[in-house]
Amino acid sequence: MLGIKPNRTMRWREWIILVSLLFILTVLAIAALLGGFSSILTNGRTLCLDCIGIF
Amino acid sequence: MSGLHRNLLRTGYRRVFQIAGVIVANPWFPYITTRKIYQGKAKGFCVPALNCYACPFALFSCPIGSLQHSFGLFHRGRELLEKALPSLFYAGGILLLTGMISGRLTCGWICPFGFLQDLLYKIPGRKIRIPEKMKPLRYVTLLVLVFFLPLLTGVHWFSRLCPAGSLEGAIPLLILKPASGLPPLGAFFWFKISILAAILAWMVFTSRPFCRTLCPLGALYGLFNRISLYRLDVLNETCTGCGKCVSVCPVEIDITQDPNSTECIRCLECKRACPTEAIRFGFGSSYPRNKEQSKESVGDYPEN
């Protein structure tokens, strides 16, 4: 933190952000386990040349 | 402000980070001899900046390309639960996570295309401001080319038109042709190159034009600037209103009025220019934004 005591409103804001981050991390982890990683990997691997406009 | 942050600012390490961003995202130099685009597992990760994964040197995937791929899977309507949803959660989750932590920090510090814009703007000559009306265009790009058209057609429309893709993917592939060969060039290719040429020319006359008017990634990250953990704040009592921060801002915003503007790329040039150290940044709590709050917590200010 920046070295000051946050007031009550600021504390709440940070809590909300931290809980949201944890939620996103959880969703991300579950999605990766369920195949999100492999889907993006397949897309990255098989990226066709027409995708970059050479045709 | 910590010693590390102060040193980073004093020595202008932003350029070092930007160069490192280019190298870390594109280190596949074996392509020069093998002429094979990297297809290893690192391509399953997205870099948090606009970097074309068709670049022959790219090691990671582009987050915007991956997001379009996810919407494209929905269009095809197959394996929704097995592929489309996990893909969207994964690609979207990486973007949300980056946005929630740092907002547009990556735009100012590691984006290779942003770095190019910074360099081209240094070419001396007449400079032009961006009309206010053009700035919301980036949201149109995000909604139309990244969300709706891939969802409706299954085609990566932004990637097809992306000037960063032309510069980092198409042109290097033409110069260093892959072992698998290239299909013949068509009219669409030249259309795409024309877009790139126009935007490159614009970069000479206007500061960060692509980031401010067209970049869908910047548009998305910008939405998080106001709520992200990483924040900027202006200490009203210390600010003298000299305007130096405004004069050096690459996206021409008045940070004293809106420190966490959706346009701010968090390059911290304002911080470097401020003679009174009125601009603060860091993860966590904001500094008080008005005099009443300042009086309440004046004893808590760090001495630096």
Image (cartoon, rainbow, N blue to C red):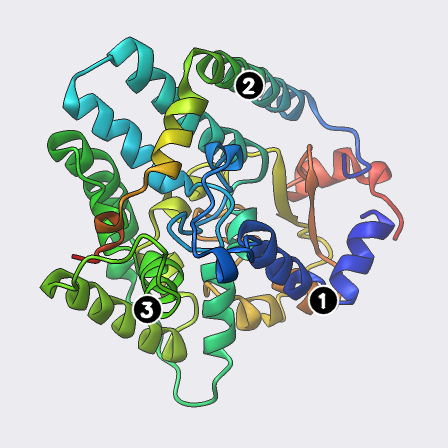
3D distance between C-alphas at marks 3 and 2: 37 Å
> Residue B182's spot in the image, x, y percent?
25, 58
Q: Chain of mark 2?
A: A
State which mark lies toward you, 1 or 3: 1
Pointer 1 and pointer 2 on the same chain: no
Residue B19 visible? The answer is yes
3D distance between C-alphas at marks 1 and 3: 26 Å
Q: Who's the residue at 21% across and 63% down the image?
A: B192
* Total marks in image: 3
The reply, left or right, for residue B211 in relation to residue B255 is left
Q: Nearer the viewer, residue B260 or B79?
A: B79
- Kindly indicate whether the residue at mark 3 contacts the one at mark 1 (C-beta within 8 angstroms): no
Location of mark 3 (residue): B130
Relative to B88, say whether B47 is above or below. Answer: below
Q: Nearer the viewer, residue B92 or B176?
A: B176
Please tell me how crowded label 1 is: few (under 14), some (14-19), or many (20+) other residues with Cα within 10 Å: some
Pointer 1 and pointer 3 on the same chain: yes
Relative to B54, say whether B297 is above or below. Answer: above
Q: Quadrant of residue B77?
A: top left
The numbered dot on residue A25 is 2
> Residue B224's spot in the image, x, y percent?
47, 36
> Residue B120's spot in the image, x, y percent?
46, 77
**Secondary element type, mark 1:** loop
**Secondary element type, mark 2:** helix
Residue B256 visible? The answer is no
Q: Who's the residue at 43% across and 51% down the image?
A: B36
Q: Who's the residue at 79% across and 29% down the image?
A: A5
Location of mark 1 (residue): B12
Give the residue type at disc 1. Gly
